[in-house]
Amino acid sequence: MIRHIVFFSAANPEDVDRICEGLMMLAAIPHSSHFEVGRNLQSDAITQERVDLVVYGEFADEAALAAYKAHPIYAECIALVRPMRELRIAADFKAG
């Protein structure tokens, strides 16, 4: 299983709800076995960096993750969210 985690911060804090709605579009992509978007509950205690939203998905394998990223809804989401975000950090790892 591949775990896919992405952190987002909004360039303008007033856009967090709109970014969240845009990211929720990704839930309609059928290639994940689990998918959720949530608001971060805290900032980093050391750096004070702010992450507003977290995307978490589980995929059977790398092919399923690649199919998810190739889906047209994924491109629609990027077009909507990218102009409103300041930060995006993604990580993918194989679950042990």
Image (cartoon, grey):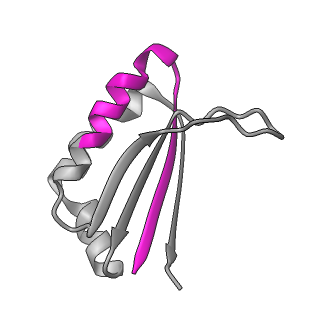
Residue 75 in the image: above or below residue 43: below
Residue furthest toward the bottom? 96
Query: Which residue lies at the image location 51% right of the left edge and 18% below the top edge?
Result: 13
Is 59 placed left or right of 11 in the picture?
A: left
Q: Position of residue 12 (x, y in %)?
A: 50, 17
Question: Which region of the structure is painted magenta?
Answer: 1-24
Residue 61 in the image: above or below residue 6: below
- In front: 34, or 10? 34
Query: Which residue lies at the image location 52% right of the left edge and 23% below the top edge?
Result: 11
Is 90 placed left or right of 44 in the picture?
A: left
Residue 9 is inside the magenta segment: yes
Residue furthest toward the top? 14
How many numbered marks are there?
0
Query: Which residue lies at the image location 30% right of the left edge and 64% below the top edge?
Result: 34
Residue 72 in the image: above or below residue 43: below
Residue 65 in the image: above or below residue 46: below
Res 21 → quadrant = top left
